[in-house]
Image (spheres, helix red, strand yellow):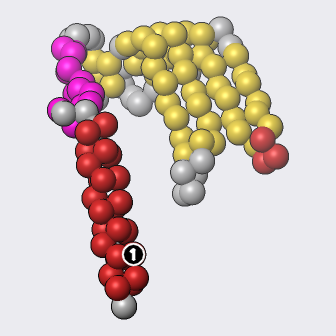
Amino acid sequence: MMRRLILILGSMVLAAIAFLIYMLWQSPSGPAIVDTHLTPTSVQSSDSIGTVGAGQGVWIKQYDKDGNLTSIMSATRYVPREGGNVVDVIEPQAEFSCPADARWFLPATAGW
């Protein structure tokens, strides 16, 4: 009976010492917090037709229902045409994902 009591008390003392050592090794201010807040930038006004305006450096990414990237389309510069939803693009590029981790890359000089 006395032996069990000594083992239990000894285990509790060792656990308390281990906990105190753990607490002493921790940073007093806690974990470092990194500021991930993004500062909004101003939007430059442009000649726009409807909801699409002229711009540059556009990227369009499309994903399937499982969240896998299926295609990426980009252009150095884009300018909307009047009277419709057509946009002229300068130096467009397209990349399509295929089964078995294959990709098709299609560069061009201009397009719509």
**Residue 9 visible in the shown view:** yes
Farthest bottom residue in view:
1
Q: Position of residue 78 (x, y in %)?
A: 45, 14
Whether the magenta-drawn stretch holds residue 72 is answered as no
**Residue 50 visible in the shown view:** no
Q: Amino acid at mark 1?
A: Leu
In the displayed structure, 48 sits above or below 21; it is above
Whether the magenta-drawn stretch holds residue 37 is answered as yes
Q: Which residue is at 23% across, 26% downward?
A: 35
In the displayed structure, 53 sits above or below 7; it is above
Q: Which residue is at 31% across, 37% downward?
A: 25
Decide if residue 67 is on the left or right side of residue 33: right
Identify the image quadrant of residue 5: bottom left
Could you tell me what secondary structure mostly forms the magenta stretch? loop
In the displayed structure, 18 sits above or below 110; it is below
The quarter of the picture where the C terminus appears is: top right
Q: Which residues are magenta?
A: 29-43
User: For the residue labelled by badge 1, is the local secondary structure a helix, a strand or a loop?
Assistant: helix
Q: Which residue is at 78% across, 41% downward?
A: 101
Where does label 1 land, which residue?
7
Q: Nearer the viewer, residue 81 or 68?
A: 68
